[in-house]
Image: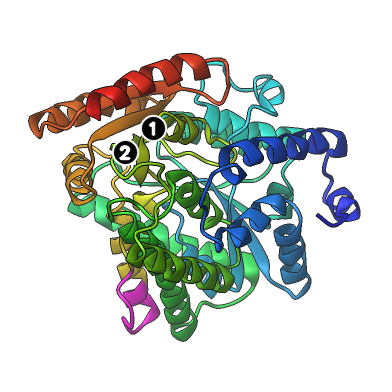
Amino acid sequence: MADYCKMWESLGINLEAHDQLLGSIPPVYQQIFLDQENRPQAMSYFDMVVMEIHGLRIQELQEHKAKGGTVVGSFCVYVPEEIVLAAGGLNVGLCAGAEIGFDEAEKILPRNLCPLIKSAFGFKMSRVCPYFESCNLIVGENTCDGKKKAWEIMNEEVVPVYTMDIPQVKSEKGKELWLDEVKKFKNKMEEISGKEIEADKLNKSIKLVNDKRRALQRLSNLRKNKPSPISGRDALIIEEIAFYDDNPRFIEKVNVLCDELEERIRKNESAQKTASSPRVMISGCPMVVPNWKLPFIVESSGASLVCEESCTGQRYFEDLVVEDNGSVGAQLEAIADRYLKIDCSCFTPNQERIDNIVRLAKEFEIDGVIYHVLQFCDPYAVEYRRVEKALEKEGIPVLKIETDYGQEDSGQIKTRVEAFVEMIS
């Protein structure tokens, strides 16, 4: 990686803590990703993106801002990227998956808070995330009590946060509320960027984000093959990179990879050591960089991870916005409709998510589901009971794993996952 120290200094990054964070990634990435056998050659691009995670892309964001563009950071798949792009902005995900910064976060937030919130908060407090420091606007949302209270404090004590109100019920009133939130966000983006969002720009942005989701759908569908032509770890890192990479380049590289995977399928080449490896889906909380603990344990225990029912997975790319929808108002309605289809556990009732998990398990011919819950994430933890009953009714085994970003429980989790994999083999 090139020397980006001057750029990081200009962003106010704590270089000592930042060096500690970046230094921890290469050896872990080597073990979890690069040491895999028979990886697709096209994964070399995504490996480069991870190695340049705080370098090349941050430099591109600074160049974009120097030309008058804006950078928007968000924590949730409900923030419409199409609107950011139509205002001449770039969207980056700010969720974090490491314990660095917990000490700073816990000076303000309670210790018994989900690690995803504490990590994002801690990254900002510790000044180790150049994405955070590059943003013109931070967008939070109220998908859970922990988030909405944390964004209040972040807004008062750390950095201004614009919060979107996500309805908790998909009723007609809920749809009206959400459409109003989408319109307010469009106005906020126009205010921040100083640019009016016009119909043709919004239409182009919708097509671009749809193309990104189509590329991810293509990759996902290829994993339905038996055996899967790509490991679950490699597929997951691509889904994670989708939240911050340059969209046109990302779309091109995912499609190049898919071309190679289709050739591997024709040659009956697989990422698995044995074609009979049990097929597993991980369902529940998102897995964000560099939280790769569970997928590594699953695949190193002999299973093939072929689907992620999470925000870093199907929930992000499953649905598209209707294109060529005319006026700005009509396109905002299409955007609101698409985003309200996302079946986060914050909704009640949430039968849609239960049905989708069962549908995905059947489509991907899943042998067992591993339900992933981050500690203190009440919505996903409580909803597990309904997921468990639905999967049991279909005869699909399920294992619940509750964990955090630490490595202390890796041995215990591996023992449980190995027993589960043996049971479903």
What SS does tag 1 mark? Answer: loop
* Quarter of the figure with the C terminus: top left
Q: Which of marks 1 and 2 is nearer the N terminus?
A: 2
Q: Say which mark, if any, is on residue 277.
A: 2
The relative height of residue 129 versus residue 379 in the rendered view (above or below) is below
Q: What amino acid type should be assigned to the residue bearing mark 1?
A: Gly
Magenta part mainly helix, strand or loop? loop
Name the one closer to the observer, 8 or 73. 8
> Which image quadrant for residue 123?
top right
In the displayed structure, 13 sits above or below 413; it is below
What's the magenta region?
Answer: 321-331
At numbered mark 2, what does the secondary structure look like: helix, strand or loop?
loop
| Most distant residue in the left direction | 393
Residue 327 drawn in magenta: yes
Residue 312 lies, in percent from the top left, at 44, 47
For residue 4, the mark is: none
Residue 296 in view of the camera: yes
154 relative to 410 in the view: left or right = right
Q: Quadrant of the N terminus?
A: bottom right
Instruction: Confirm or deny contact between disc 1 and disc 2 (CB under 8 A).
Output: yes
Gap between marks 1 and 2 measured at Cα? 6 Å
**Residue 322 located within the stretch drawn in magenta:** yes
**Residue occupied by mark 1:** 302
**Label 1, residues with CA under 10 Å away: few <14, some 14-19, many ≥20:** many
Q: Which amino acid does label 2 sit on?
A: Ser
Relative placement, left or right, of 328 versus 161 is left
Query: Residue at image x 20%, y 51%?
Result: 363
